[in-house]
Amino acid sequence: MLIFEHSKSALHKTNKTELNSIPAAMRRRQSAALPEVSELQAVRHYTRLSTRNFSIDTHFYPLGSCTMKYNPRVANSIALAPEFAGRHPLAPEKFSQGFMSCMYELQEMLCEVTGMKGFSLAPMAGAQGEFAGIAMIRAFHDANGDHQRREILVPDAAHGTNPATATMCGYTVKEIPTLADGDVDITALEAAIGPQTAGLMLTNPSTLGVFERQIQKIAKMIHAAGGLLYYDGANLNAILGKIRPGDMGFDVIHSNLHKTFATPHGGGGPGSGAIGVSARLIPFMPIAGVIKENESFRWANKSDYPKSIGRLSAFFGNPGVLIRAYVYMRLLGREGMTRVSEFSTLNANYMMAEMKKAGFEAAIPDRFASHEFIITLKKQAKDLHVTAMDFAKRLLDLGYHAPTTYFPLLVPECLLIEPTETESKEDLDGFIKAMVQIQHEAENDSELVTSAPHTMPVKRLDEVRAARQLDLSWTVTEAGKV
Amino acid sequence: MLIFEHSKSALHKTNKTELNSIPAAMRRRQSAALPEVSELQAVRHYTRLSTRNFSIDTHFYPLGSCTMKYNPRVANSIALAPEFAGRHPLAPEKFSQGFMSCMYELQEMLCEVTGMKGFSLAPMAGAQGEFAGIAMIRAFHDANGDHQRREILVPDAAHGTNPATATMCGYTVKEIPTLADGDVDITALEAAIGPQTAGLMLTNPSTLGVFERQIQKIAKMIHAAGGLLYYDGANLNAILGKIRPGDMGFDVIHSNLHKTFATPHGGGGPGSGAIGVSARLIPFMPIAGVIKENESFRWANKSDYPKSIGRLSAFFGNPGVLIRAYVYMRLLGREGMTRVSEFSTLNANYMMAEMKKAGFEAAIPDRFASHEFIITLKKQAKDLHVTAMDFAKRLLDLGYHAPTTYFPLLVPECLLIEPTETESKEDLDGFIKAMVQIQHEAENDSELVTSAPHTMPVKRLDEVRAARQLDLSWTVTEAGKV
Amino acid sequence: MTPLSSVALLFKVSDDMPFIPHTENEISSMLESIGVKQIDDLFSEVPAELRAAELLKIPTGLSEMQMTQLMTERGAQDGRPLCFIGAGAYDHYVPAAVWQITTRGEFYTAYTPYQAEASQGTLQLIYEFQSMMTTLTAMDVSNASVYDGASSVAEAVLMAVRANRKSKSKRILVPRNINPSYAAATHTLVNGQNIELVDIDYDKDSGCINLDALKAFEGEDFAAVVIQQPNFFGSLEDVDAITDWAHANNALLIAVVNPLAMSILKPAGEWGEAGADIACGDGQPLGAPLSSGGPYYGIMCCKKALVRQMPGRIVGRTLDEDGKEGFVLTLQAREQHIRRSKATSNICTNQGLVVTASTIHMSILGAAGLENAAIQSHLNTRSLVEKICALDGAERMFDSASFHETVIKLNKPARAVLDAMTESNIIAGFDLAEDYPELGNAILVCATEQRTEKEIDLYVSALAQALSEV
Amino acid sequence: MTPLSSVALLFKVSDDMPFIPHTENEISSMLESIGVKQIDDLFSEVPAELRAAELLKIPTGLSEMQMTQLMTERGAQDGRPLCFIGAGAYDHYVPAAVWQITTRGEFYTAYTPYQAEASQGTLQLIYEFQSMMTTLTAMDVSNASVYDGASSVAEAVLMAVRANRKSKSKRILVPRNINPSYAAATHTLVNGQNIELVDIDYDKDSGCINLDALKAFEGEDFAAVVIQQPNFFGSLEDVDAITDWAHANNALLIAVVNPLAMSILKPAGEWGEAGADIACGDGQPLGAPLSSGGPYYGIMCCKKALVRQMPGRIVGRTLDEDGKEGFVLTLQAREQHIRRSKATSNICTNQGLVVTASTIHMSILGAAGLENAAIQSHLNTRSLVEKICALDGAERMFDSASFHETVIKLNKPARAVLDAMTESNIIAGFDLAEDYPELGNAILVCATEQRTEKEIDLYVSALAQALSEV
Ligand SMILES: Cc1ncc(COP(=O)(O)O)c(C=O)c1O
Ligand SMILES: Cc1ncc(COP(=O)(O)O)c(C=O)c1O
């Protein structure tokens, strides 16, 4: 039932006579048709609605490329404490030293753990980080008069935001194929590089769950051609504290703080796509950042970043997310960071090993996994007519959120499985057991799997109908109907 | 699965060498067998566990005598704000004026709305309020040298805490029968009163859901015999702001703040059984209370209550509950209080009227209900072999918490239904519809009802086994088993 | 622009009828269904002279925003003094997860789990809680809580009188060094049943109960001996000897314990040869905020043989109709709603939500987390005491080992010193003068794991100043 | 007693491996299953020279308790100044229920609802959110949010360029009185695609855009006209006339709105003859705490015909296999994970949790609650401005009607006056000097419904003093 269906008119009242200083023509004639319910009705409705979600707090959620790890509750209570939640973005620096010191230290810690020379916390998600990064690359080339560089190279395993971002920055995109072992096809890359190359966007470890072994060579090739190297940090969890993008030769990177640094995904956001740069890109950094001067903190201005690409948001990105990430980083500390990559990698490799033993086919069977790995169900799809999607749906019945399905696009019938370091062996084993059970069902009673889920609030939904007969909002007409 | 079953030894470590100043013989040899789990495991376990409860925030919960109304969320955030949650009970008055002003105003508001002359916030639940009240009655008689008064009168409709409390105070209990119309049997009462009478405990409106019409006469009778009148305020919600116990002639009353004043029941508590007294009982009040003097606040001492019955708790009852009640009362204000009784009474009478129309038998059909009313299912039990318990269990399947069953004891197969004022007509109608459906099922497929619930995490539980084969805790032996 | 008349309009979060969801139309149709004209008619059975007048002393309602503003002001008024006081309520750290989960609506707004099938969340949690309390105290069984530490002692005393098969006595030996508020409340609560509490004095050097003091009572008949570990002075009692003495004298042993201390001290069930018979105490150190004294909860554990004399709710594990495990309230025949005037106690509503918090708290911390909190509190207090004793005019009162509280003897009037230290925003200790006048200028101090070295140093320098200036 | 070595032991809430649940035994057995000796072996494919050294600039980990202490200190350092500033972020009251429910684990820690059957909670909520936004703006459809107000303007501009069938222009008319940060960010974000933002100047008396200013552009080709209501100066634009002008000139009309103001002002969908084509703005006033500037969310609504050009996620209602209603992400073919380099936008993660809060906020307040907040903010600002203008040396800059912000012209240096007022713990307004040097000493002030009369009076007396002393 929609909240609107609990609604009744004339529950609440307003006195609008006090608006007489506003010309009538500018005023609203009829109140918005928002739900009119009591506080209890609203509380009950949304409390009940919440229980129709899977979440980390309720389920193992091994969603590849998404790093669904535990989100410490203390980060939430600190971010929502009145001192932080109540601070106005334009509060004078005098009233902001406590907040700014956190942001400054966050910048510094991110530099240290990634090996970059400057960090901006402004981007509001990974994709905006990518935008800022590619915009800096463009600004850099433009500043050098290198206007012919109109192309960005992107491996075919890349996330869709990479090519979309390049387009947004006015670049054309050239896809680079990936080899069967998960590494970039160097020959193809070689052939693609030229004077038109502005840069390459790379995720390492890639979305195939393996480390790009030729990264140093790739960096050299791109740099030799005058291009810059962009690091999509969505998978930073896999190497945190052990390997640094800056050391690999990347010129600009983003880090999804909502992944690696445990800020909650919130059913779709908010995130933070903080970006780090090498020394030569510092002048191009976006507004705003925190600068330390004489033991106090001030906001960066145009003289700090003379060739700044400009402002990305109305204020300073998503500080509520940044505070959470800061808390998490300080809780982990130096040792804790390295443990993140070690144990997320241990978990992924353990699961891959056990699943291979159980008869599942790994997409890249002969290499170590990073913090995630891919199972391909193409045999099941062909022989049993049970697809990756069917496995995914049936997993829900068994109390596990499905892994990422059908991404990366180049592996057929794939499940991209990322357990993260905060899950216990007990839960990994439970998931594997569930997969084995489904395999058994697929072989013996495939209908059970292909018609799953059976225990969710709804069965499979008609997506075609959704897109064809668009029903995107409850309307007053419908209220009349009720 | 129990939290202990997620536990693994050697997850956490301690350095105990620092305890060397404590003699070894006084120290613990082996760590307690508490669960050893990660924070995520604990969070996930208890988050999931919580969803196995019905609650006001998720369900209509018309539990008679319990006043399951909406618990405003703002009261929770204020009570848990560091300023209130962090205050030490023995903090000097200098650091306590803000807190004490709230407590003082709460005392004053309770006096005003109940018509009493003094109020103590010390009792930690209704039963302790009763204890304090009856102890004051005893102290009063003792102070008058009236040592022969050894008996407390209690109507048979009373809650079990009433007789239990009288016993605890060293009194014997005499039960007074109730008439079919719900009023006390005055003739029987007359006969029971004597020089041995210390007092009468009465709930008005009674647990039968009707107002005791003879209350003034009863008060006169008891007072004429030298006894005192105790008011069990569990049903204060029914008359709040409209009728005051003090005006009815009660000498001492308790108010369940966790009912009438919307502090949460918390799955069993905490509560507050604040007690109000008439002028002559003020000297007997328990420690502690807040006194206003020269525009500032101080704690009451023995000179304020020279004949005090003493202390009831280590500190000052349950201030976290008191803060919540204070917030609620200030939100309601004067007008809001009266609305509570009006709308809780409207809701109960509406439900009773509709259920009678639907064919259900009201226990007291010809009178107005107070804020609750009783349906008796004795016909269903006799004709269809479907009991009140069966209806209760089947209601769970339909998404409604069951009303109170088999209380008060004198009505066979009863459901005591209290909707409270915060529920909307929509939910009342839904409940009635569910009852009609169950009646229909009872007539056509009684097995469906008698074997209910079918959709809960467990089916009906074996209570006899529970009491015979006591299994009251998980033990280490069992851990060995796992 | 028209002139502005006033800023009087109230911003109401909800509307003119907070928390009441009825529209005019609904009210009419409901009245019609009942067959009355107006709501007031529903009160027609009430004698007219009983109808209340306007509640003039109650202010009109506030919006949620106004209420929040008011309480922010009131809270700010009290400041956030540095707390070096324990005396029954301890400023321990509680992980943020604890109350965030505890206040989920499903726990926060549920009733007592009488409908078991719709309350498995709360019931299983209480079963887990009982399991945690029994392992922590090394007792056989635990209930689901009584009100607080004081009420747990009173209920333990009542229980002992009922349960002691070897003695029909209604006399109980109670040391003078148990929390004086517990003793006072126990007196209030058991008084009506003619139970007599007999004082045992403490040793002037150690602050503890020694066997000599007990010997004076040998041959007399007592239902139970109460002993608190650590005692109110923070000192550690020779619990083994006292327990054995009690049993040798046909008395039950009631252990009053700090449950956090139980993580590092010998647990009550292991005291002496046979262990304590009943363990009680206040659960506050296990996840309850100080909150001006409550809600906390009373711990109540006992030996298996005594379970039917135990007050309060108890959860048992059992099976459902399909043979699946589940949880129910059990042994309800002891309780007032069934047993009425013959119940083991009148307690009905207990402290469920705090028990919920406590259970989650213990799960997150585990044994090691509790031990660490206990050890760090012990060390912080030792550090504080050492630094205090290095000052002129302050010394340790007792020579016994202690957990995380210690009595300090001052050479200046205690009240004045404490008052002076409030100027530095410090609550410097609990003045023992009222309860123990014989100790002279004595204060009880405590530094939990939350007190930092900086704060301890702040304390010491403020004390040095106070001692020199008072 | 042995002497106390140190108080160095750290109280860890959890243990030495926070958030990692592996025991030594488990690690061994997992390594064995993989067939390696140690965890480091799993990184053997990484060239040795890439292995990072110790992260010396990152401090060692803190316990949760220490972290809480640290952040309490940092928070206290910033004080809680009285806020009389808006300029795009408004200090409105948010009912306590909103974030208590929003941060329930099921909302807080879920991912984007790609697995629809396991995400009906979030999906239905977004559908309800879309419904609320469309009724508030009187537009046909809404998406599930973009990043913030600034990003919503940029996305609206990109969308207009794609969507305008009557014009192939990449030029957009942008008033100088829209939020200058929105204009700046829009410039950054659309710049790469060669879109040109053309300034429209505001009228010096009213602070608003008048038709004369627009007439200068007649005959030129523009993809869209942007207009902000209320504009950055808090003044109300003649939206009907401007919308009609845009349409008459084949441009789309992009409405940048304050959604709270929409509850009392003519909604974007009703502007002029045909209504705005795209409505955007910042959702912050609907339940997001100020939080130093975010997370807020960007509103994005449009006419039905433009829906396939809309960026961002959209939820649709549909049926499941049994014909039961349910909700899914729909029109995903517009998005980057499908459409890649041809997507309508690169935005993937949006501001879901704030949308959740906002939806609950709007449900609790209802239309009347929003209206009351809007009206009271309007009245408070009027009261503030009247009192300010009664002082010597301060007057209204513009003569237009306003909502809840107003530009004040001072006869003293604005910066110095604002600085002086920080001494009274007041954030007294936004200095317009940098963005609008032509206005001289001008500040933008705002008093939301949360500012009390007492606080307003405090402001006025502090200003009086500052004006006399600076
Ligand atoms: C590999 C990769 N790159 C980029 C992104 C985009 O990040 P965001 O969703 O924060 O914009 C994602 C997130 O899903 C991702 O998995
Ligand atoms: C009528 C009546 N009296 C007394 C009580 C006892 O109150 P409490 O549970 O707060 O001790 C109750 C509560 O259940 C009750 O319903």
Image: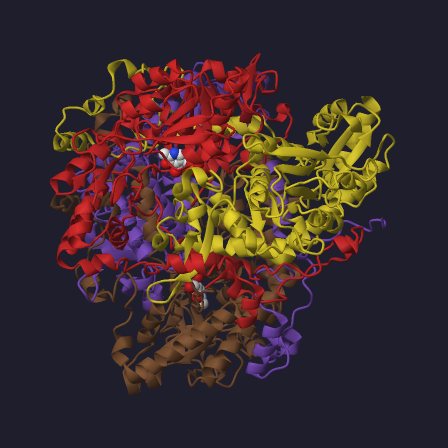
Chain colours: A brown, B red, C yellow, D purple
Tally of numbered discs: 0
Q: Nearer the viewer, residue B113 or C142?
A: C142
Residue A81 image position (x, y, % from top left): 52, 41
Q: Nearer the viewer, residue C279 or A47?
A: C279
Q: Quadrant of ligand 1?
A: bottom left
Task: Describe residue A382's horizontal placement relative to residue D289 as left or right.
Answer: left
Vertical side of A45 occupied by A344: above or below: below
Q: Residue at x 80, y 21 (%)?
A: C470
Residue A21 image position (x, y, % from top left): 29, 22
Q: Is residue A420 visible?
A: yes
Task: Describe residue A181's horizontal placement relative to residue B214 as left or right.
Answer: right
Vertical side of C436 occupied by D291: above or below: below
Q: For residue B180, what is the image quadrant?
A: top left
Residue extending furthest toward the bottom:
A383
Q: For residue D32, what is the image quadrant?
A: bottom right
Q: Residue at x 61, y 51 (%)?
A: D64
Residue C441 image position (x, y, % from top left): 79, 27
Q: For residue C423, what is the image quadrant?
A: top right
Look at the image and tell me in which quarter the N terminus of chain C lies. Answer: top left
Vertical side of C428 occupied by D454: above or below: above
Q: Residue at x 47, y 43 (%)?
A: D293
Vertical side of C119 occupied by D321: above or below: below
Residue B371 image position (x, y, % from top left): 27, 32
Q: Nearer the viewer, residue B367 or C119?
A: B367
